[in-house]
Amino acid sequence: MFLKVQMPWNVIIPADSLDSKGLMLKKAIVIRLMDEFASKKATKDLGYFMAVTTLESIGEGRVRQNTGDVLFPVVFSGIAFKMFRGEILQGVVHKVLKHGVFLKCGPVQNIYLSHIKMPDYRYVPGENGMFMNDKHSKIEKDVVIRFIVIGTKWMEAEREFQALVSLEGDFLGPVS
């Protein structure tokens, strides 16, 4: 689900980037904010950071004693993406294994669909393994699947989420 978030942030502008007339200050703050925002990737509470939409406010700058750099507290609005339990989403299969498939959905790269959570589907081995049901519906690489989220897990070291999903429910499975 996409969320609109408002976040406080501290932006540090190096002393050599400051203009004596102050004309380029807002631009320097925005550029620095975008760089830091892009490198942050995600947080456990807000999910994946997708975009900065508006810069709400820029606080009064404070000069750092040792370096001469200036720290500006800013508040901005942005868009984040986070999966929630019970949410129905679509993803693309990127890896097929004997015991299930891995999907991608937006910025989430590690979504696992176990063969146990695919009712009526059975694994068909071969060069390009796949899952197939009696109606000849296929789950293979690059197929779009509608699924329900069973649970998510935050991986702090990688700064990303993992999810476990299911096809148990109405209107879930491969999308034509």
Image (tube, rainbow, N blue to C red):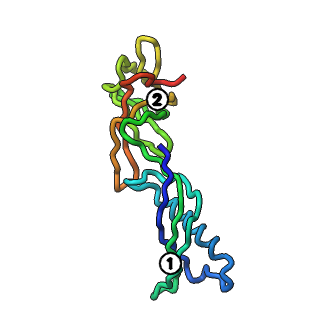
Find disc 1 in the rendering and name its residue.
Answer: 71
Q: Residues within 10 Å of mark 1 (few under 14, many from 20)?
A: some
Q: Is residue 125 above or below residue 62?
A: above
Q: Is residue 140 above or below residue 89?
A: above
Outermost left residue:
116
- CA separation in Å, label 2 and label 1: 45 Å
Q: Residue, x 53% and y 79% (percent of image)?
A: 60
Q: What amino acid is labelled 2 in the image?
A: Arg
Q: Quadrant of the C terminus?
A: top right
Q: What amino acid is labelled 1 in the image?
A: Leu
Q: Residues within 10 Å of mark 2 (few under 14, many from 20)?
A: some
Total of numbered circles in the picture?
2
Q: Earlier in the sequence, mark 2 or mark 1?
A: 1
In what element is the residue under mark 1? strand
Q: Residue, x 63% and y 76% (percent of image)?
A: 25
The image's mark for residue 146 is 2
Q: Which residue is more in the foreground, 77 or 103?
A: 77
Q: Which residue is more in the foreground, 113 or 71?
A: 71
- Percent x, y for residue 70? 52, 81
Residue 172 horizontal side relative to residue 15, left or right: left
